[in-house]
Structure formats: structure tokens, C-alpha cells
Image (cartoon, rainbow, N blue to C red):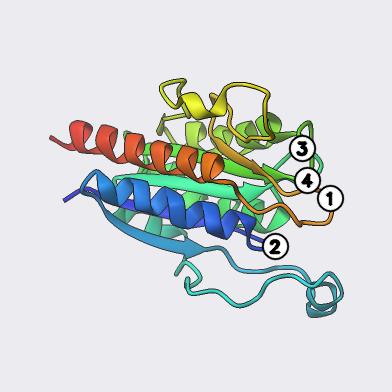
């Protein structure tokens, strides 16, 4: 059975919800899926003052070597000034050993994100994640336009050909819509399907 890891960082729960949807999509394609988060690196007083969401059902990933156990890795993180946040970057900075030994070459990778506004740097953030995956030798799956719900301007909707996205609003009040979650499920399914084909 194809093994998929959904690895995420979420400050306020938006990316956590997207991670659950990505996992749901991958499972619908028959994959065995684990959801893990990276460790919080912000000081406790910052976490408390900013009211970060600290309750979650998902365990922190054991360490970078765990990545080698999967056929596909789907990475989710919010944007911080047009790039992935330091918490996720710090984790990928520990994967030099995997790069040196080529342990992730040929695996499938993907990215998803959230921003406060519609023009808050979603695509740049996706690329900041994807760049790491490409350096590791992974094959990238985006959110192709087979997922038509990302099109149109009648409502606020996330989505990008580079990965599933959602828009949180400046105060975090907007939760991922059904269209956003549908994009996450679609991308998760596509990743799992490709990983299964490559492993066959």
C-alpha cells in the first residue's frame, strides 16, 4: 500500500483543517496516510500572546529521517511575508542527511498554504516549500485545473495550479470553505494516485 505523509505547521488551525482534507483525499485513493506536524519554535510567551492554536490531534514528526518511510510527502504551512514560516523552514533545514544520501529522490511531493488576503503571497509560499522538495529530488504535484472549483470570481476561493490554498482574513475569521477543502482533497488524491503508479 502506498504510504503518504501530510506534514504541516499551523498557527491558528486553518492549515490543520486543510491537512485533514488532504489526508482524506489521499485515503480515498487507497493510500495509508499519516498526519504529522512540525515542532513549534516560537517562544511560549509569543504563542500565548498571539493566541496560537495549541490543541491538536496530530503528533509532532519524530525527525527528518521519518520522511524516508513514505512514498509521498505533502507539506502545508501558512505564509510569513511570502514564504513558509520559520517553524517549517527549521524542519527542512535538518534534512541535509536525506539530501546527501538521496533518500527522497523519486518520491512524490506537494504543497498547500493559507494567507490572510487574496494577494498575500500564496504562490510564493508554495514555491518556497516546493523548492525544498525539488532539491530533495521529488516529483511535484500541484492542483491542476481538473479541479474546476478553484476557478471564477463569484466568491472568495483559494486554489492555485501550484497547490491547494485557503484565505483566512486578517483576523483569522474565515475558515476553509468547502471549495478550499475540496481542492485539498483533490490534490491529496492526485498525489496518492501518482505515488501508487510510480511504485508499481
- The picture places residue 38, in percent across and down from the top left corner, at 56, 63
Q: Quadrant of residue 155?
A: top right
Q: Earlier in the sequence, mark 4 or mark 3?
A: 3
Q: Nearer the viewer, residue 152 or 7?
A: 152
- The picture places residue 168, in percent across and down from the top left corner, at 72, 49
Q: What residue did someone put label 3 on? A: 82
Q: Is residue 59 left or right of residue 83?
A: left
Q: Is residue 105 visible?
A: no
Q: Is residue 74 left or right of residue 125?
A: left
Q: Residue at x 20, y 48 (%)?
A: 30
Callout 3 secondary element: loop
Query: Considering only vertical position in the picture, is 60 above or below 10?
Result: below
Rate crowding at label 1 as few (under 14), some (14 to 19) or many (20 or more) other CA atoms within 10 Å.
Answer: few
Q: Of the residues tagged 2 and 4, which is closer to the observer? A: 4
Q: Is residue 35 visible?
A: yes
Q: Do the CB atoms of the residues marked 1 and 4 lie less than 8 Å apart?
A: yes
- The picture places residue 193, in percent across and down from the top left corner, at 26, 35
Amino acid at each position: 500500500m502506498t504510504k503518504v505523509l501530510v506534514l504541516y505547521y499551523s498557527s491558528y488551525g486553518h492549515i490543520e483543517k486543510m491537512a485533514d482534507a488532504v489526508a482524506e483525499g489521499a485515503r480515498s485513493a487507497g493510500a495509508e496516510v499519516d498526519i504529522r506536524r512540525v515542532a513549534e519554535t516560537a517562544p511560549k510567551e509569543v504563542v500565548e500572546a498571539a493566541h496560537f492554536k495549541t490543541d491538536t490531534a496530530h503528533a509532532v514528526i519524530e525527525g527528518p529521517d521519518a520522511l524516508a518511510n513514505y512514498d509521498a510527502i505533502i507539506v502545508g504551512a501558512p505564509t510569513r511575508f511570502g514564504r513558509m514560516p520559520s517553524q517549517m523552514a527549521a524542519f527542512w533545514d535538518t534534512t541535509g542527511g536525506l539530501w546527501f544520501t538521496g533518500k527522497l529522490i523519486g518520491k512524490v511531493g506537494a504543497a498547500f498554504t493559507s494567507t490572510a488576503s487574496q494577494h498575500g503571497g500564496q504562490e510564493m509560499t508554495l514555491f518556497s516549500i516546493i523548492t525544498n522538495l525539488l532539491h530533495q529530488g521529488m516529483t511535484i504535484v500541484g492542483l491542476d485545473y481538473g479541479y474546476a472549483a478553484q476557478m471564477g470570481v463569484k466568491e472568495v476561493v483559494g486554489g492555485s495550479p501550484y497547490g491547494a490554498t485557503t484565505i483566512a482574513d486578517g483576523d483569522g475569521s474565515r475558515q476553509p470553505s468547502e471549495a478550499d477543502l475540496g481542492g485539498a482533497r483533490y490534490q491529496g488524491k492526485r498525489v496518492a494516485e501518482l505515488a501508487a503508479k510510480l511504485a508499481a
